[in-house]
Image: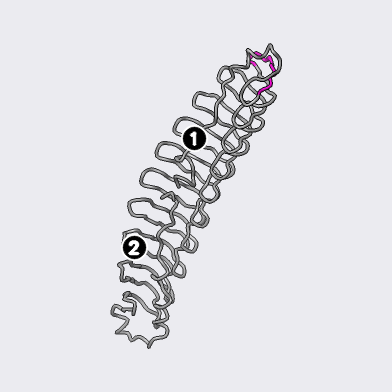
Amino acid sequence: MDPHLQEKDLPRPEYFSSEESEELTHGPALSEKEKSKPFVFRNGSVYVGQWKGNLRHGVGWQKWLDGAHYEGQWSENAAHGMGRFTHINCDMYIGQWESNTAHGKGIYHHWNLMTYTGEWVNDLQEGYGVESWHEGVRYEGLFLGSQKDGHGRCVWADGTSYTGRWRKNHFDGFGMHHDSSGHVYKGSWQNAVIHGTGRYIWDDGCSYSGQYRYSVKDGFGVFRPTDGRRYEGFWWNGHQHGNMNCVMDDGQIFTSVWCEGRLSGGDPASDSKVENVKVLKVPEVGAGMVGGDMAG
């Protein structure tokens, strides 16, 4: 699994367990003297802070046996309000809480790996947020269920970028992709691959506008090399296939018939004009470009 897409190590259920709350609510009333001292639960965790009857309420600090600890606001035995949770590996969440879960706005520091700043719903990244990885990857946009979902922009350390729609951590919908080689694609994506209608521009200035099927030219499209000509016609599996017009830079039109990238018929006078059409296979979307396979 891509390390950029791993779930954040948020507090596990046993950290804010119902057993702790039940121990307080079903136990004898605490005296003021008992409340002024650290309270040790049967599971070994320790609470120091304010109380409301037998309920942790106000500002308090709690540490569990493994060393993880929470400090911040409590409301009737639940972490609620502003607080900070620190894991034994130094990962840390600082922000808003509701009923023992990260909920609202907060910052999650994944020690020596990444930082997420944004919105949370029930311990999950949800809403608008910015995720920055220490090696230089940065995503800014919408999340749903801790996955990139909606409109967002991701920039990689080598300068590659994608701006557009995401679905479950993949490019999906309309978007624009710039890679580090200078290639640009603007159009439709499906499950992290070019699929549908779009325009691809190579670093040498050649371009193709038309239909794609799983990252290859397939359907009707227009190919423009840099010499001023224009090729309009049908493509199949990345090659010219069927009728195609070659429009010269002086406006002349030559018609030809192609089969899997080779001339197979048409106006004989046109063959010398179109036989050297530059056939370019669209590069596959590499691992460094794909939201679901490499980067977050």
* Mark 1 secondary-structure assignment: strand
- Find out whether the residues at labels 1 and 2 contact each other: C-beta distance under 8 Å: no
Q: Position of residue 31 (x, y in %)?
A: 33, 86
Vertical arrangement, residue 177 with respect to residue 71, above or below: above
The stretch of residues the image draws in magenta is 248-258
Left or right: where does residue 220 sit relative to residue 139? Answer: right
Left or right: where does residue 72 sit relative to residue 171? Answer: left
Check residue 23 in the rendering and tell me which mark sits there, or answer none.
Answer: none
User: Splitting the image into 4 quarters, where does residue 216 fall?
Assistant: top right
- At x 40%, y 56%, the residue is 107
What is the spatial separation of the Cα atoms under label 1 and label 2, in whole angstroms? 38 Å
Look at the image and tell me whether residue 146 can be seen: yes
* Mark 2 secondary-structure assignment: loop
Mark 1 or mark 2: which comes first in sequence?
2
- At x 67%, y 30%, the residue is 220
Query: Which residue matches tag 1?
Result: 178
| Between 65 and 46, the one nearer to me in the picture | 65
Q: Position of residue 157 (x, y in %)?
A: 40, 39
Q: How many marks?
A: 2
| Between 3 and 178, the one nearer to me in the picture | 3
User: Splitting the image into 4 quarters, where does residue 84 fall?
Assistant: bottom left
Is 251 inside the magenta-drawn segment? yes
Q: Position of residue 5 (x, y in %)?
A: 45, 51
Query: Which residue matches tag 2?
Result: 87
| Between 37 and 113, the one nearer to me in the picture | 113
Q: Residues within 10 Å of mark 2 (few under 14, many from 20)?
A: some
The type of residue carrying mark 2 is His
The type of residue carrying mark 1 is His
